[in-house]
Amino acid sequence: MVTISKLTKEDICQVVLLEEKFLGETLGEEMLNAELNNSAMCFLSAKEDEKVLGYIGAYVIEDSMEILNFVVDETYQRLGIGTLLFNTLLNMYDKTKSIVLEVRYNNEKGISFYKKNNFNVISMRKHYYKNGDNALVMMKEIK
């Protein structure tokens, strides 16, 4: 059974591996450790037993949210884990009025997920990622 909980120090190594494998870059152990106790940050993991299947990290201030990273192991995609992580985050911050994020311009699965969840492309950031890929900036407004 998949459980959603706050990210712990013990989860960080698995999260970094997930980020590197599926995103091609990582926020890094140092940053994740440093931000775990930041009240403006929220990191949630989806786990089965002790295995991290995915995670989402967001910066939240007042009624605005910025999703920093969001990844689900490819083996576990299309099983509702991403939706569970995303909805759990939104339910925790139910006063959120807008959410912004960047997504790699060629990440079709990610873009499809965000569009399904009422995000719209608002701009592009050229050469945003370390490998030179562009990022689409997407936003969701909540009424």
Image: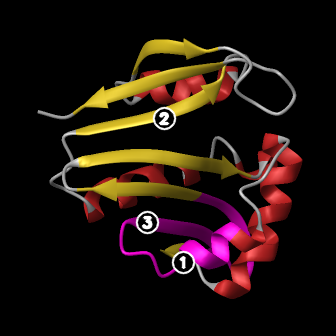
State the SS at label 1: loop
The answer to whether residue 32 is magenta is yes
Crowd tier of the residue under label 1, counting other residues whose Cα lies within 10 Å: few below 14, some 14–19, many 20 or above: some
Q: CA distance from mark 3 to mark 1?
A: 7 Å
Tell me which residue sits at (60%, 48%) in the image: 70
Give the x, y percent position of residue 45: 58, 68
| Residue highlighted by disc 1 | 36
Q: How many marks?
A: 3
Span colored in magenta: 31-55
Q: CA distance from mark 1 to mark 2?
A: 20 Å
- In the rendered view of the protein, which quadrant contains the N terminus? bottom right
Q: CA distance from mark 2 to mark 3?
A: 14 Å
Compared with residue 90, is residue 37 higher up or lower down, i.e. above or below?
A: below
- In the rendered view of the protein, which quadrant contains the C terminus? top left
Q: Are marks 3 and 1 in contact (CB under 8 Å)?
A: yes
State the SS at label 3: strand
Q: Is residue 49 visible?
A: no
Mark 1 is on which residue type?
Leu
Mark 2 is on which residue type?
Leu
| Residue highlighted by disc 3 | 41
Q: Are marks 1 and 2 in contact (CB under 8 Å)?
A: no
Crowd tier of the residue under label 3, counting other residues whose Cα lies within 10 Å: few below 14, some 14–19, many 20 or above: some
